[in-house]
Image (spheres, rainbow, N blue to C red):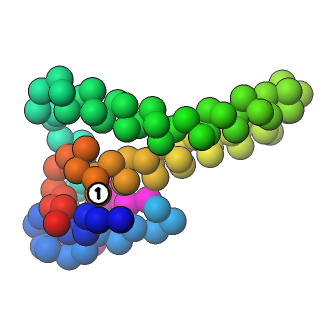
């Protein structure tokens, strides 16, 4: 995997824990999604995101009968989806498909 992420303000490496990057640096700089430059980039981002999210959808499809019976599993599935979304977001930043304000990817 390529793409070391560093804070654009202080130059510190952005610490990735469990595949998820933080929303702010230790120096106080906040990381936010930068605007996309053109529809080509949006399309590439959406396709990569769909690809990365697909294993989760497959998993939910497989356990859907269980999901119908349990509200707890619904919550777990939702939490997993949100977590996986953050993991994908971090991956996409490292791959250069998503630009983050305040983050330099080398
Ligand atoms: Zn910083």
Residue 46 location, x and y as percent? 35, 30
Q: Pinpoint residue 43: horizontal percent, then vertical percent.
A: 27, 27
Residue drawn at the location 12% of the way across and 64% of the way down? 8
The residue sitting at 46% across, 37% down in the picture is: 51
Viewer-proximal residue among 95 and 78: 95
Residue at 29%, 57% (x, y): give it. 94
Q: Is mark 1 within 8 Å of ligand 1?
A: no
Q: Quadrant of residue 38?
A: top left
Which residues lie in the magenta part?
20-28
Q: Which SS type dominates the magenta stretch?
A: loop
Q: Is residue 25 visible?
A: no
21 in the magenta segment: yes
Classify 55 as above or below 83: above
Q: Nearer the viewer, residue 50 or 17?
A: 50
In x, y percent, where is residue 1?
Answer: 35, 65
**Could you tell me which secondary element the residue under label 1 belongs to?**
helix
Percent position (x, y) of residue 81?
58, 40
Using residue 16 as the reference point, say whether residue 25 is left or right of it: left
Extreme-bottom residue of the structure: 12
Instruction: Say which residue appears at 86% left-offset and 32% top-offset.
Output: 66
Q: Quadrant of residue 14?
A: bottom left
Task: Count the marks.
Answer: 1
Which residue in the protein does label 1 denote? 94
Q: Is residue 50 left or right of residue 39?
A: right
Task: Classify 10 Å Cα crowding around label 1: few (below 14), some (14-19), many (20 and above).
Answer: many
Q: Is residue 103 visible?
A: yes
Is residue 29 shown in magenta?
Answer: no
**Above or below, comparing residue 84 to residue 4 in the picture:** above
The image quarter in which residue 20 lies: bottom left
Quarter of the C terminus within the rendering: bottom left
Q: Nearer the viewer, residue 87 or 49?
A: 49
In front of the other: 56 or 69: 56
């Amino acid at each position: 995997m390529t793409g070391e992420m560093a804070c654009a303000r202080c130059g510190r490496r952005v610490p990735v824990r469990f595949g998820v990057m933080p929303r702010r640096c230790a120096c106080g700089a906040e990381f936010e999604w930068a605007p996309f430059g053109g529809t080509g980039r949006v399309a590439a981002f959406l396709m990569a995101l769909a690809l990365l999210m697909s294993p989760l959808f497959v998993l939910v499809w497989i356990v859907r009968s269980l999901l119908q019976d349990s509200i707890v599993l619904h919550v777990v599935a939702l939490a997993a989806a949100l977590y996986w979304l953050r993991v994908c977001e971090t991956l996409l930043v490292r791959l250069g498909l998503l630009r983050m304000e305040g983050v330099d990817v080398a």
